[in-house]
Image (spheres, rainbow, N blue to C red):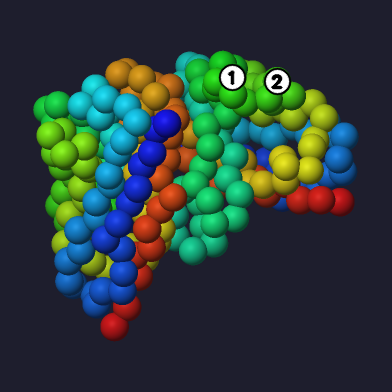
């Protein structure tokens, strides 16, 4: 199975900060990576797919990049509603695995 | 609007069975592959199972293979997960989710609110 490792696992930031989360795959997955946002008690929300394509309705302050084994999710200017847990997912091959999550909290 | 509503969760003893349902609306259900994803308390997301739009393909995580069965009824716009021989480690919130594309490569674009399954004696 392909393992995904996110860093950091926890991040403390302020409103307006630029935030970057990294996701590393244990083997190459081309650009078959998605990012999700999840708030407590809620379902995950698709933010980005194909490593860099913004899902419809997602604010442009979110962006994704990378290919192969290293990927990043960037929030250009953190907003109050962005405090949540972010998870990456590889869709290169079955089984479709997720990273362990990065919790973004208010500093 | 797209809606996915899970039901069927609850408390069940180890070794027993449970059947989850996911009622879909707001889109042509029969055109989309569907997934089950679970999340144990305080843990990350774990993909569980996939069924193609026409039931011709089914895939399972190793952790549930042989115990869980995914199925769908396209005439009733409903997805199912039959869970047998339940274990304590199956305790989780179970989400149904829609595949964003027919290639299974573009993530899961709509999710239900989840239903909690607790396996405990």
Look at the picture and state if B75 lies above or below A42: above
Q: Subunit of mark 1?
A: A
Asked where in the image residue B98 lies, by quadrant, the reply is: top left
Residue furthest bottom in the image? B121
Q: Residues within 10 Å of mark 1 (few under 14, many from 20)?
A: some
- Indicate the position of residue A63 as horizontal and vertical percent values: 68, 22
Find disc 1 in the rendering and name its residue.
A54
Asked where in the image residue B12 lies, by quadrant, the reply is: bottom left
Q: Subunit of mark 2?
A: A
Residue depicted at x 36% and y 20%: B101
Near-viewer residue (A105 or A101): A105
Residue depicted at x 59% and y 39%: A37
- Indicate the position of residue B24 as horizontal and vertical percent values: 29, 39
Residue B25 is marked as: none
Near-viewer residue (B17 or B67): B17
Asked where in the image residue B89 lies, by quadrant, the reply is: bottom left
Which element carries disc 2, helix, strand or loop? loop
> Dots 2 and 1: beta carbons under 8 Å?
yes
- Indicate the position of residue B72 as horizontal and vertical percent values: 16, 39
Q: Residues within 10 Å of mark 2 (few under 14, many from 20)?
A: few
Quadrant (top left/top right/bottom left/bottom right) for the N terminus of chain A: top left
Exactly how many numbered labels are in the figure? 2
| Residue A61 appears in the rendering | yes
| Left or right side of B107 for B7 | left
Q: Are marks 2 and 1 on the same chain?
A: yes
Which element carries disc 1, helix, strand or loop? strand
- Whole-angstrom CA distance, mark 2 to mark 1, is 8 Å
| Left or right side of A4 for B81 | left
Look at the picture and state if B64 lies above or below B106: below
Find disc 2 in the rendering and name its residue.
A60
């Amino acid at each position: 199975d392909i393992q995904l490792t996110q860093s950091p696992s926890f991040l403390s930031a302020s409103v307006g900060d630029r935030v970057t989360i990294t996701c590393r795959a244990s083997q190459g997955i081309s650009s078959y990576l998605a990012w999700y946002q999840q708030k407590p008690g809620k379902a995950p929300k698709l933010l980005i797919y194909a490593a860099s394509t913004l899902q419809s309705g997602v604010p442009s302050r979110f962006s994704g990049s990378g290919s192969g084994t290293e990927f990043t999710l960037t929030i250009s200017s953190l907003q109050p509603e962005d405090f949540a847990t972010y998870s990456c997912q590889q869709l290169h091959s079955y089984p479709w695995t997720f990273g362990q999550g990065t919790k973004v909290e208010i500093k | 609007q797209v809606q996915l509503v899970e039901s069927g969760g609850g408390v069940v003893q180890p070794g027993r069975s449970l059947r989850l349902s996911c009622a879909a609306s707001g889109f042509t259900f029969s055109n989309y592959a569907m997934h089950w994803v679970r999340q144990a308390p305080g843990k990350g997301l774990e993909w569980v199972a996939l069924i193609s739009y026409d039931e011709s393909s089914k895939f399972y995580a190793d952790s549930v293979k042989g115990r869980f069965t995914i199925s769908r009824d396209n005439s009733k716009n409903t997805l199912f997960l039959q869970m047998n021989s339940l274990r304590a480690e199956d305790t989780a919130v179970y989400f149904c989710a829609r595949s964003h594309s027919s290639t299974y490569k573009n993530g899961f674009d709509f999710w239900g609110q989840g239903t909690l399954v607790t396996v405990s004696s």
